[in-house]
Image (spheres, helix red, strand yellow):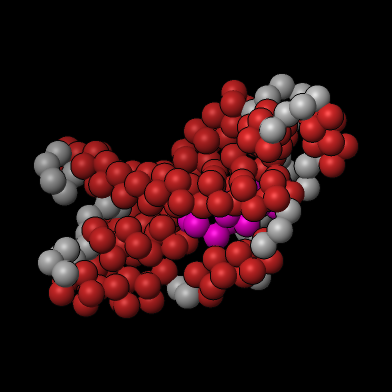
């Protein structure tokens, strides 16, 4: 109980809420890199996944290729890119972390988008073609809306994974909530370590709830929210 009391006291200490090392700034650093990595992954993954799913071809090779990234741990990607980043003058921290989180978020968004579009009821697609719709109109007007629950759920799951993995950034000199965990271990401050873990868990839950609420508003009425089973990252 005394240890938990120390953790509560840590959160109540005004010094932990101000300055560059304060909770608000660390949360902002964490959110910033997480959002950038997830948005970049979605921007790269969605266009080819939508088109390949629409064409219903080339998917196996594309999904297998993208899923190679899932076989490499995020920290290994950081370690591989760190000397390259330094040599290119990009420095420590941000870019190695960004690449690792991007590689983490990309596969589930790509694979689930491709699968969701590919599996849209062929009867609906044929009905659209029968009305004279072009390929682009079929994709935008029928396939993408029908697949949207799974696509949005995949983005949500990827975002939560990114937020939960971003503390690794502290190991390569980036900020974020991982600093509390890494710095706490360095000085054997278990209170700071636990506080950092609580903050990361809380931010992950907040991300899940926020994107879940957005899903409910964005998904076309009648389609419902995608199930977790459909939105889980596909295995290569």
Q: Is residue 172 above or below residue 120?
A: below
The reply to whether residue 89 is in sight is yes
The reply to whether residue 6 is in sight is no
111 to the left or right of 181: right
Q: Position of residue 209 (x, y in %)?
A: 53, 35
In the rendered image, residue 156 lying in the magenta stretch gets the answer no
Range of magenta residues: 105-116
Q: Position of residue 56 (x, y in %)?
A: 73, 53
Q: Nearer the viewer, residue 5 or 174?
A: 174
Q: Residue furthest right?
A: 123
> Magenta region's main secondary structure?
helix
**Residue found 37% across the figure and 44% down from its top:** 35
Q: Nearer the viewer, residue 142 or 127?
A: 127
Q: Is residue 66 above or below residue 2?
A: below
**Residue found 47% across the figure and 40% down from its top:** 207
Screen quadrant of the C terminus:
bottom right
């Amino acid at each position: 109980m005394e240890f938990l009391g120390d953790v509560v006291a840590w959160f109540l200490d005004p010094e932990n809420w101000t300055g560059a090392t304060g909770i608000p700034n660390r949360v902002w650093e964490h959110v910033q890199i997480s959002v950038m990595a997830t948005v970049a992954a979605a921007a790269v993954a969605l266009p080819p996944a939508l088109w390949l799913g629409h064409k219903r071809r080339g998917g196996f090779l594309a999904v297998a290729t993208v899923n190679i990234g899932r076989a490499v741990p995020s920290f290994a990607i950081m370690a591989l890119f760190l000397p390259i980043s330094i040599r290119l003058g990009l420095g420590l921290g941000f870019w190695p972390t960004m690449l690792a989180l991007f590689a983490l978020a990309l596969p589930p968004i790509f694979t689930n988008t491709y699968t969701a579009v590919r599996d849209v009821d062929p009867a609906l697609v044929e009905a659209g073609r029968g009305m004279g719709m072009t390929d682009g109109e079929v994709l935008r007007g029928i396939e993408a809306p029908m697949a949207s629950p799974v696509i949005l759920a995949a983005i949500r799951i990827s975002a939560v994974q990114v937020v939960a993995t971003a503390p690794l950034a502290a190991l390569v000199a980036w900020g974020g909530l991982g600093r509390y965990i890494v710095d706490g271990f360095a000085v054997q401050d278990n209170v700071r370590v636990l506080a950092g873990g609580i903050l990361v868990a809380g931010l992950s839950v907040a991300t899940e709830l926020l994107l879940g609420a957005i899903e409910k508003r964005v998904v076309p009425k009648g389609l419902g929210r995608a199930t977790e089973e459909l939105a889980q990252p596909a295995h290569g």
